[in-house]
Image (tube, rainbow, N blue to C red):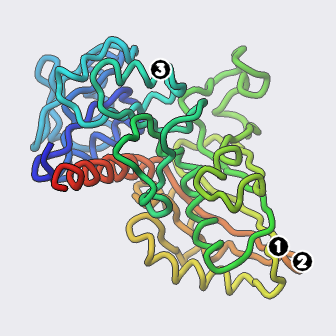
Amino acid sequence: MTRGQPIRIGLMGFGQIGRQVYDIAARSTDIEIVAIADIGEPAILHYLLGAEMGEDAYQLEGNFLHNRRFRSRLLRTDSPAEMPWDVFGVDIVIDATGRFRDRAAMQQHLQAGAPRVLLRTLPTDHIDRLVMPGINADSIRPEDRMLSAGSATTTALCLLLHALSRDFDIDCGSMTTVHAYTSDQVLQDYAGSDFRRSRSAAENIIPNQHEAGAWLGHVLPALAGKVLTSALNVPIHQGCLLDVNLVFADSAVTADTVNDCMRRRAADYAGIVTVVEDPVVSSDVIGNPHSLVFDAWGTIKAGSNTVKALGWYETLGHAARLLDVARLYADLDHRQEAA
C-alpha cells in the first residue's frame, strides 16, 4: 500500500461498534471497508445500519454493501479462520466482535491473510501492542501484528489519568464506570455465565468487574497496580460515565487545579479529549466522537488529598479511535517503504 491509496480494512462483527466503524469510514476520505464478516442476514445488517445511522445513502446489492465511496463484500461467518482476508487485500482487520480475544483466535486472522489484526476490546493474552492514540502512539513498531485499542472505558480512563499525571503525582485511585447495558446482557432474567449477569439488563443496576485496572500498567507503567476498576451496568442504551476518585501526593491539588489542568491538556488531545462546562447528562454525549468528555461540573475535593472527577464517553469515540490506530500503522508502513 502506498499512503496515497485508501487504507483497506476488513471488519469482523457488524454490531454497534462495527456499524459505527463503517459509518465513520464511509464519511472519511482515506479508508475503505472492503469486506465485512458477520453471521447476520445481509438484508438485516443493512436495515440495522440505516436504522441506527439515519442514513439513506447505504445500499445493499446482493452481498455487497454500497455507499458513496466504496463497496463492501458481506460474508456470513463468525470464524476468523474462514475469512479469506488475503483475497480482499486488506491492510488490517478490525475484529469488532468482542469474542476473539486470545492469541489463538488472532493468529487465525493472520493465517487467513491479514497483515495485522486489531481488537476493539481488551485481549485475554499477551499481544504485540495495546495502542491508545494520544498516549502511546509513538510506541508502535512495524513488526506489530496482534493489536488492541483497549475498550471505550479503558481508553477514557487512561486519557484522564495520563492528562492529570503529567501535572500531578497520583498515589492511587479507583474508577467505577456507570455503563450502558451491553449486547451480551439478557433483557429478562435468564441463567447465564454468572449470577448477576443472569439478571435483566432492562430492569436492574448490575455490578460488574472491569478489566481496565489489570491493563492500565501496559499503557501507563507508573500507575500499574494503583487504580482499582469496577462497573455498574445500568438500563440505558448509550452514554457512559467514569466516576474516578484519585488520591494525590500533594494536598494542594484542588478541584479547580484539576479542572484547569484538564482544560489546558485537552488541546494536546485534539479530537480525542474535550472539556464540557455545562450540566450534561448521559444522553447529551450520544454522538460525541471524543473518547473522553471531561465534566468540569463534576469535580469535587474530598478530604485533604482526594479529588473526585467525572468523564463521559460512548462507543462512537472508540470506533473513531480504532480507525485512528489503523491510520497510525498505515503511516508507519508508508515511512518504512519510503526509507
Residue sitting at 28 percent across and 28 percent down? 47
Q: Amino acid at mark 3?
A: Ala
Image quarter where the C terminus lies is bottom left
Residue of label 2? 303
The reply to whether callout 2 and callout 1 are in contact (CB within 8 Å) is yes
- Under circle 2, the secondary element is loop
Q: How far across and down, in percent of the image, does residue 272 sit?
A: 43, 64
Residue of label 3? 105
Label 3: few (<14), some (14–19) or many (≥20) C-alpha neighbours in 10 Å = some
Q: Amino acid at mark 1?
A: Thr
Image quarter where the N terminus lies is top left
Name the quadrant containing residue 289. Answer: bottom left
**As displayed, is residue 76 above or below residue 24?**
above
Q: Does 189 sit left or right of 66 as displayed?
A: right
**As displayed, is residue 116 above or below residue 238?**
above
Q: Does 325 sit left or right of 208 as displayed?
A: left
Does label 3 or label 2 sit earlier along the sequence?
3
Residue that sits furthest to the front in the current view: 339
Q: Amino acid at mark 2?
A: Gly
Q: Does 70 sit left or right of 104 as displayed?
A: left
Residue of label 1? 306
Label 1: few (<14), some (14–19) or many (≥20) C-alpha neighbours in 10 Å = many
Residue 171 appears in the rendering = yes
Nearest the viewer among 129 and 151 is: 129
Q: How far across and down, in percent of the image, does residue 8 sit?
A: 20, 38
CA separation in Å, label 1 and label 3: 42 Å
**As displayed, is residue 39 above or below residue 281?**
above
Residue sitting at 65 percent across and 57 percent down? 221
